[in-house]
Amino acid sequence: MNLTPKSMNYIKIEKHGDPEVLKLHSMPVPEPSPGEVLIRVSAAGVNRPDVMQRKGLYPPPPGATDVPGLEVSGTVVSTGKNVSEPMVGSEVCALVTCGGYAEYCLAAASICLPVPENISLEDAAGIPETFFTVWTNVFDRGQLKSGESFLVHGGSSGIGTAAIQLAKAFGATVYTTAGTPEKCEFCENLGADAAINYREQDFSEEIKRLTEGKGIDVILDMIGGPYFPKNICLLADEGRLVQIALMQGSKAEVDFRSLLLKRVTLTGSTLRPRSVEQKTEIAKALRKNVWPLLDTGTVRPIIHQTFPLTQAAEAHSLMESSAHIGKILLKT
């Protein structure tokens, strides 16, 4: 017997603007297409792309719902054709194109992953967006290997806390930047070998000192703008700079002689526009390489605060304040 209701609550971006434009509305519960599952949402992650979408700077792909939310956890309540796994009743977390800020959400079955052992169903909503992003950028594109050095800017963010833990778990020496002494201390307790307060120290000089002038093998950056030339100068020979966001701008003046002399690789990516097939491959890699670490508690999602769905505006305000450490969630 199908007990799924006909309608559900969701968060609508009533117009582009400040957090107050996020309002609770009602709409029909969607039905899964072939290859999809319908998830009764326990919680949804709040991410900076959601903030950008709210401001009108990051529209959803053509044909996708305009309901924000890139990751959810919950219980599968129905499946489309050609879906054998996950089965109805399975507790999963999933990366979604959008639609997470709702009581029910569609997800591609192949991008659903089981909730790790010892992590609550609610907290599992803080896993997909950050761990998919870190894996595909740091380990696929950046090719970080054991024994190498790694720098992530914004170490106290959701991406940062995941990157610190995974890089350390796979044998790298980990450096990070953060904006307060408390955030730096948290990053070091999480596994960073050194955390640099960028408001009080010149991170370029500190990294040069810490690496004895050798530089960094892989840098994960979401800042952009003035960080471009600094990052390139900080890379070691054969170093890789992986760009995943541009919070301080998409343009900078760069002297590319360092790139030539040190044989530097510049790369970057965004996650949402990728195909289901590409995301499925990332999900498979996570299941093989990262899920055992989550199951044992070696790494975990860092949850800063969970808000009820009705307080999506407050959650966005916290995100934009950058006062948080780790993930912000919305509970349905």
Image (cartoon, grey):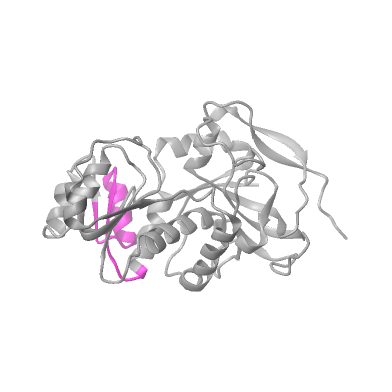
Considering every residue shown, the one lying at the far right of the view is 1
- Which residue occupies the foreground of this view, 185 or 61? 61
How far from the left and from the top, in percent, is residue 53? 54, 36
Residue 181: in magenta span: yes
**Rendered position, 174 above or below 273:** below
Q: Which residue is drawn at 59% across and 60% down?
A: 277
> Is residue 159 shown left or right of residue 111?
left
Instruction: State which quadrant residue 264 falls in.
Output: bottom left
Q: Classify 292 as above or below 58.
A: below
Residue at x 30%, y 48% (from the top left corner):
182
Whether 231 is drawn above or below 170: the answer is above
Residue at image location 33% in from the left, 54% down from the top = 186
Give the percent coordinates (x, y) of residue 206: 16, 51
Q: In this view, does 142 lie to the left or right of 13?
A: left
Which image quadrant: the N terminus?
bottom right
Quick check: is 201 in the magenta stretch? no
The x, y position of residue 27, in whole percent, is 76, 38
Q: What stretch is highlighted in magenta?
A: 169-195
